[in-house]
Amino acid sequence: DTAVSQTPKYLVTQMGNDKSIKCEQNLGHDTMYWYKQDSKKFLKIMFSYNNKELIINETVPNRFSPKSPDKAHLNLHINSLELGDSAVYFCASSPGPFNTGELFFGEGSRLTVL
Amino acid sequence: GIQVEQSPPDLILQEGANSTLRCNFSDSVNNLQWFHQNPWGQLINLFYIPSGTKQNGRLSATTVATERYSLLYISSSQTTDSGVYFCAVPNNAGNNRKLIWGLGTSLAVNP
């Protein structure tokens, strides 16, 4: 019974295309996150939503647009993909905002831009 | 902002050996988490440990908040323990409230 699930797990696409990654959590958590992990394994937060409200928005190009239809879902849409967008994108959730409580991750979505 | 340093950056063990990984942080924190990223890329939450000691099987963690460090102990290591171990602490200063991550300890356990 997967706690945080994200789809697709793998994405291979051409530069300039638009793609979306979906995330769902069944833990009843209020807060969800998108992280980007580059090839050097560094984890960088991109966005955080608490109960559908955006609470963290790091310096991310506006080609990246998160959407949270409800507190159990947080999707990430990326427009006009660039080579530098290639990375693994992790969705995560925690019970409350601002890092209160344990953080649980999805399995990651590996995006390759050609 | 708060700094997080992990040591050692890399570690190679023979199966069955014990090891200690360290996480230092530069300011007081109200929680700390340890994660394991396995060779398949999955990020697993190991411990949520603001202070004191917790144990889970062969793994245990101790956080000494007053001295600003945490230790992760791996006993009788197995090849499945290989991967990268991260610690993370919250930066609750001002409006910049996010987790600050260490760069990780990359562990390889050889059979």
Image (spheres, coloured by chain):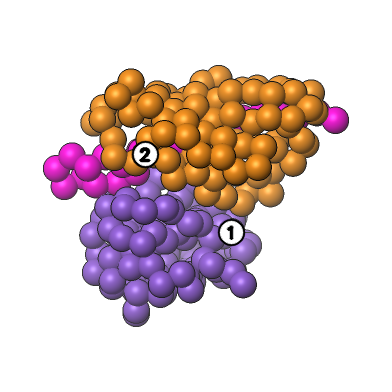
* Colour-to-chain, orange: B
For this rendering, which residue is in front, B17 or B55? B55
Binning the other alpha carbons within 10 Å of mark 2 as few (below 14), some (14 to 19) or many (20 upward) gives some
The tag on residue B50 is 2
Range of residues picked out in magenta? B86-111
- Residue underneath mark 1: A107
* Chain to which mark 2 belongs: B
Q: Circle 1 — which element?
A: loop
Query: At which x and y percent is residue A55?
Result: 23, 60
Farthest residue in the right direction?
A: B111
Which quarter of the rendering shows the N terminus of chain B? top left
Q: Circle 2 — which element?
A: loop
- Chain A on-screen colour: purple
Query: At which x and y percent is residue A45?
Result: 37, 49
- For image coordinates 64% across by 31% down, the residue present is B74
Q: Taking B48 as reference, is A96 left or right? A: left
- Is A66 included in the stretch rendered in magenta? no
